[in-house]
Amino acid sequence: MVNLEWYRTFKAIYKTGTLTGAADALFISQPGVSLHLGSLETYVGYKLFDRTGRKMIPTERGKILFNAISEPLSKLEEAEKNFQRSIEKHTPTISVGMCFETFQTTLEQYVSTLPFNLIISFGEYPEMLDQLDKGILDLIITPKKGSSPNIEHEAFSSEQIVLVGGKDVDLVAFNKVLKSKDAEQIEAWLMNEKWYGTTGDMEHLFQFWTLNFGHKPKFRPNYIVPNLNSIIRCLKGGTGLAVVPDFLCKNEIDGGEVQLIWQGKKKLENILYFGCRKKTNYQSEIEHIKGLFRQVMGK
């Protein structure tokens, strides 16, 4: 089935004469416009535009298609606007991407207070950057910057990746081994403990281990759980080790339920960024969400 957005994009290209103009009119990226056009041309089975320099010249079949869909599409767009006015009272819908743990720790507590509609999306960072560029997401929270010229990144906080453990882990014994500064002894002590990991993302453990010991860990965690917040809850049982971002367990460490075991020989830090398109219709809503994150993360 054809996607209605393909027709909307086709109409914008026809009206503006360029991919850039269509992207500006629709508030999506130029690659997103190209993707929609390519998908529509594949669907109908023929070219809709001749690309002459930067200009998009409609083919004869493109003109026929435009004449066929222009008026119905305009009526549908008008009906959409009237529907939003009468039913949704202009309440905008914002799509935000971030990792599951970040959502639970920061934004989840404020969802019911938001004066606009919200869709939360979880996924890998490269996927979220791509969806942001294509106009599927409006805002992402990410430790990785993309390269698209349509996206701007704003640093707002940082996370330190640390080694934490249950309250029953013998921290005195570990500190004694740590004072030896013998990497092999330190590694052996750590490998003798029980470890927690997650099903999807072991990057924190790999980065921490490589920075401190020069190679990836030579063991698999004993317990694989769904996410990082699950690890924190399990560590409150008293035993075990894990490598996690510090902000996820700050309250548990302050409360004595979890121990900060080691920050590493060198601090492993990630800068956290807001990512959004440079042109958006939802600037005030995006700023509202940014404010909540700054409030929770204290920066």
Image (tube, grey):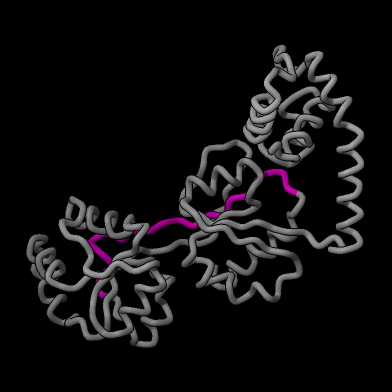
Magenta stretch bounds: 261-280
Above or below residue 130? Residue 297 is below
Predominant SS of the magenta segment: strand
User: Which quadrant is home to the N terminus?
Assistant: top right
Question: What is the quadrant of the C terminus in the image?
Answer: bottom right
Q: Residue at x 25, y 73 (%)?
A: 241
User: Residue 297, percent across and down?
Assistant: 52, 70
Q: Residue 270 appears at what percent x and percent y?
A: 41, 56
Where is residue 253? Give x, y as percent: 36, 81
Q: Quick check: 23 above or below 299?
A: above
Residue 180 versus residue 191: which sits nearer the camera?
191
To which quarter of the image does residue 117 belong? bottom right
Q: Residue at x 39, y 87 (%)?
A: 255
**Residue 239 percent coordinates (x, y):** 23, 81
User: Eyeballing the image, is 35 above or below 87?
Assistant: above
In the foreground, 246 or 61: 61
Kindly identify the residue that appears in the image at 41 percent across and 77 percent down.
250
**Could you tell me which residue is drawn at 71 percent across and 25 percent down?**
44
Q: Is residue 185 magenta?
A: no
* Numbered disc total: 0
Name above or below for residue 136 compared with residue 7: below
Q: Is residue 271 left or right of residue 241?
A: right
Q: Quadrant of residue 7?
A: top right
Viewer-proximal residue among 166 and 3 = 3
